[in-house]
Image (cartoon, grey):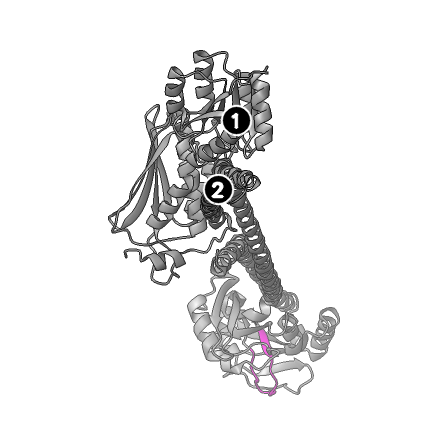
Amino acid sequence: MSNHYYHGLAKSMMFTIILVSFTPLLIIALLAGYQYSVAYKGKVVAHLRELVLKHDQNVDSYLKEKIAEIQVLADVEGIANLKSEVRLEALHNSLLRHHRGDFVDLGLVNSKGIQVAYVGPFNLRGANYAEAEWFKNVQERQVYVSDVFLGLRGVPHFIIAVLIESKGEKWVLRTTLDFIMFNKLVEDIRIGETGLAFIINRNGEFQTTPRKDIIKEVPFLKELAAGKNEFSGFVQRRGSISMETNPATGQETIFVISPIKNGNWLMIYQQDVSDAFSDLNQARNIAAVVLLLGGIAIIAMAYLMSKRMARKVELSDLEKDMMNEQVIEAGKLASVGELAAGIAHEINNPVAIMVEEAGWIQDLLEEGLYVDDNEREVSRALNQIRSQGTRCKDITHKLLSFAHKIDPTIIRVCLNDLIHEMAELCEQRAKYANVNIETSLADNLPEVAASPSELQQVLLNLINNAIDSMDPGGGELDIATRFENGVVSVSISDTGCGIAKSNLSRIFDPFFTTKPVGKGTGLGLSIIYGIVSKMKGEITVKSALEKGTVFTLKLPLAGLELEQDEKSANSGCVL
Amino acid sequence: MNTEVIRVLLVDDETGFTEVLQKRLGKRGLDILTAVGGTVAIQILRKNDFDVAILDLKMEDMDGIEVLKIFRKMDPDMPVIMLTGHGSEKAAKEGVSHGAFDYLLKPCDIEELIEKIHQAVNR
């Protein structure tokens, strides 16, 4: 078979191995990867949410705690005490002691907005807060926590103010909370490279300092916050999560948003997705590298293995072909053996005549060459010897032309000529077996593509089998060629014992024989089958018990590219 | 020893062989009648008596063994010497088992053949 075939075989094996190895690998990798990434992302997001929820609570309780402290002061201390700066200072010092400096200052403001008493680092006694936002608000709400603002002191701060009513007069106790301390509550939330938390108010103003400059994000954050939470203080919507492309950085970003201070502020945590899921990405990269290396290994292995396997198949095919050739040769020798008996006898007769004629010449010479008719008789005897010698030569020539080494080369063969030759060769054997060989050969027969020596073997075997089947008693052996529907066929029919139906399907099997042990190898027909199949021909058999058997060979026509058989070239076969 | 001329029936389908053998044996004082093929030989034997028959084993018209069996029936006293080519010794021995006196392999020495003939006649 051609190299092309084995290349194709190797290729299809390679693709099969790759497909079979890759499919489950990819399916598992994709499924497991997807599941893992979903689970991992879920976990990360849940963790971030947890973090934000914890901190928003912290901030809320921080504010509530501070408010409660101031309310306690307002309730317990009378206005008289609060008006006294000495007393106020004592209270402030106590607050500083217990709250690590959260309360920056403490002041009492009268109904007109004038700060009548003040303790703290700034000189704010007498300051007028009548127009301050917080002062207006506290009148309505009793307790008010302001947004962060610069105020009179020019430093970011925010105020807790509590309204006190005493003897029909309204007072406001106010304190400033340390912005830096408050800032730390959220500033400490930092995860990975880009994770940061901050607080904004309704207007999108920062209430804490983000650890990075994200001022550009503000309009987007406002919009986002409006969409997500509407600043209406829905405490039940704490920790809502959104993944959006941050227009400021162009990165996909996770936002965790929680309302605090009754919905007046929003605590926002943000982190780039790539940063938040960096471990996942790393795992994904490792998996991709492993998959890639595995893939390369699989392809390399598939390539090598399929190549090796194709090579093995090629070698075993080669071995099989060689075995076939040997079996064919052995079969040929066996058929030559069968021929030998007939030919030995054929050659023995002329040899016997020659020996006797030579003896006769000796007899005559003993008498004297010139006695009677002796000279003429010697000359006759010599002629006889020569003609018998020629007879021997013809026989050996025929035999030799058959017995030369098998040449399986397929060339153009004139089937009729070959059949003539074979019929002649078998004539002697047929004569003794009382078989009459008849040939009816079509004269429009085109040449066929075959190896002449192998075709000879096929015909010889079929003829020998036919003669055997008519033993004893003999019969008729017809060899006919035909050219019909573009097919050249030759049929060899005998009037022999026929083949039982039960055996018909097995006759081409190797070692199947009905001959007694030692008489037949059971290889003849299987070899024929092999040869005919190799020539891309066909062999069929029809048989009826006690009536005879017909073997029909169909042979492929010779294409123009084939070389011409020398013999048929000389004899001028009809095309 | 029989003083009369020994009459021999020589059966073979090769005329070239029977002719020259007839001449050689005739020169040695034997009376030879040749028959080409088994059928002719049987016809001849019907009308003639012979002291000995020389019979080829393989002939086109009849198998030598078949002819031998007929000869044995027609003239059981007549010894038959089988002649055969190399390679058919087995068949020749079969002939002996069917009552042939002996066999010789073709081509044979003329003296040996004559001795065999004498042995057969004087058995």
Q: Amino acid at mark 1?
A: Gly
Rendered location of residue A170, percent (x, y)? 54, 73
Q: Quadrant of residue A422?
A: top left
Residue A354 x %, y %:
51, 41
Which residue is farthest right?
A97
SS at badge 1 = loop
Secondary structure predominantly adopted by residues drawn in magenta? loop
User: Mark 1 packing: few (<14 Cα in 10 Å), some, or many (20+)?
Assistant: few
Asked if residue A494 lies left or right of residue A468, the reply is left
Q: Is residue B106 magenta?
A: no
Which residue is nearer to you in this view: A268 or A90?
A268
Give the left or right position of residue A107, taking residue A468 as reference.
right
When asked about the image quadrant of residue B46, the answer is top left
Density class for disc 2 (Cα within 10 Å; few <14, some 14-19, many ≥20) is: some
Residue at point 47%, 62% (across, down): A234
Looking at the picture, tell me which residue is in the foreground, A67 or A218: A218
Give me the disc on residue A242. Answer: none
Residue range (magenta): A148-160
Q: Chain of mark 2?
A: A
Which residue sits at x=33%, y=62%? A560
What's the distance in space between the residues labelled 1 and 2, CA to CA?
A: 18 Å
Q: Which chain is home to disc 1?
A: B
The circle drawn on residue A374 is: 2
Amino acid, disc 2: Asn
Q: Is residue B1 visible?
A: yes
For mark 1, what is the residue? B29
- State whether residue A528 is above or below residue A215: above
